[in-house]
């Protein structure tokens, strides 16, 4: 901004300089074409100057005085122009130096970024939160919110404390979401499609609704792991006991902190129900 102001002032001075230079040029041209009086300076040297010659002398003297002022103004403007030009050059050099320093700092930050990511990943793993290249996609939600979400009553976790799954319309606690994203990617690589989800976090009101509709297949409201944001109900083949998808989940889900609880094998029988345990995840 300061450089722009200097350049604007410099342009204005150059305009003024062009204006005051004009009368100086006119004076030089006039004295060259039309010397003083009709016979130049001869009448003054011989003592024969008449009234016309004296009047011409007076006019010329006044003209010379005015032109002298113009010359002085021109000199002042030239000096000011040189000063502003110098300051503008210094500012430009300063800007170039600042740009170079900024570019160097950005390059340094880029070089450090990998180390920072690795340090953050290690810190999250120590907290029991599994992070891999796929799981990072779920970090739009703060993974440290898992501990905060755990302090809320079952089914009363605020939406802001939950993380959305890739399956639209469903969400879980932050650490469970991150682990599920990785599990989902592994499932996609094996079966060529993402996991099918029919339910995830349930609010207390939703738990009550499910319990009244399916009392034999739902936990008492306020006691479901769905209300903690730590359980999902799956479809797409996983819901069929001993299917290829179910067997794959049994074999691989614990690698991501997920498991099929013992009670779900018989009482009640829910092959579609899977839960997340951060303790399992932290041991992997």
Image (cartoon, helix red, strand yellow):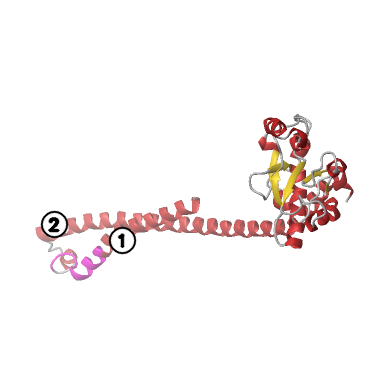
Q: Which residue is mark 2?
A: 55
Q: Which residue is mark 1?
A: 21
Q: Is residue 242 above or below residue 263?
A: below
Give coordinates of residue 272: x percent, y percent: 77, 47
Count how many numbered circles sit on residues in the image. Answer: 2
Q: In the rendered image, which quarter is residue 148 located in?
A: top right
Start-end of magenta stretch: 26-38
Sequence-wise first label, 2 or 1:
1
Q: Is residue 144 left or right of residue 170?
A: right
Give coordinates of residue 171: x percent, y percent: 69, 42
Q: Residue furthest left?
A: 51
- Residue 36 painted magenta: yes
Where residue 63 is drawn, which disc sits there?
none
Please indicate, yes or no, whether residue 77 appears anywhere in the rendered image.
yes
Q: Residue at x 49, y 57 (%)?
A: 88
Q: Residue at x 58, y 60 (%)?
A: 96
210, 96: nearer the viewer: 210
Q: Secondary structure at mark 2?
A: helix
Q: Nearer the viewer, mark 2 or mark 1?
A: 1
How many angstroms separate mark 2 from mark 1 (CA)? 26 Å
Please indicate, yes or no, whether residue 127 appears anywhere in the rendered image.
no
Majority secondary structure of the magenta segment?
helix
Q: Is residue 49 left or right of residue 274?
A: left
Q: In the rendered image, which quarter is residue 199 located in?
A: top right
Q: Residue furthest right?
A: 283
234, 59: nearer the viewer: 234
């Amino acid at each position: 901004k300061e450089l722009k102001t200097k350049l604007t002032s410099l342009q204005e001075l150059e305009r003024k300089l062009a204006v005051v230079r004009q009368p100086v040029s006119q004076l030089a041209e006039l004295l060259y074409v039309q010397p003083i009086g009709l016979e130049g300076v001869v009448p003054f040297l011989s003592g024969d100057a008449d009234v016309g010659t004296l009047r011409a002398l007076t006019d010329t003297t006044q003209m010379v005085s005015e032109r002298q002022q113009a010359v002085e103004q021109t000199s002042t403007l030239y000096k000011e122009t040189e000063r502003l030009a110098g300051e503008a050059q210094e500012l430009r050099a300063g800007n170039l130096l600042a740009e170079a320093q900024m570019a160097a700092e950005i390059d340094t930050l880029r070089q450090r970024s990998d180390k920072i990511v690795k340090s953050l990943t290690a810190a999250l793993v120590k907290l029991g939160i599994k992070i891999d290249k796929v799981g990072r996609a779920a970090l739009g939600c703060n993974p440290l919110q898992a501990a905060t979400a755990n302090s809320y009553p079952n089914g009363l976790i605020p939406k802001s404390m939950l993380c959305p799954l890739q399956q639209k319309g469903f969400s879980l606690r932050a650490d469970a979401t991150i682990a599920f994203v990785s599990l989902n990617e592994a499932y996609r690589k094996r079966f060529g499609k993402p996991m099918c989800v029919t339910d995830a976090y349930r609010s207390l009101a939703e738990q009550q609704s499910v319990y009244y509709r399916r009392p034999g297949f739902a936990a008492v409201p306020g006691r479901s792991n769905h209300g903690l944001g730590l359980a999902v109900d799956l479809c797409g083949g996983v819901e069929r006991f001993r299917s290829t998808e179910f067997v794959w989940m049994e074999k691989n889900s614990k690698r991501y902190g997920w498991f099929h609880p013992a009670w779900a094998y018989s009482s009640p029988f829910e092959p579609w129900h899977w839960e997340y345990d951060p303790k399992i995840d932290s041991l992997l």
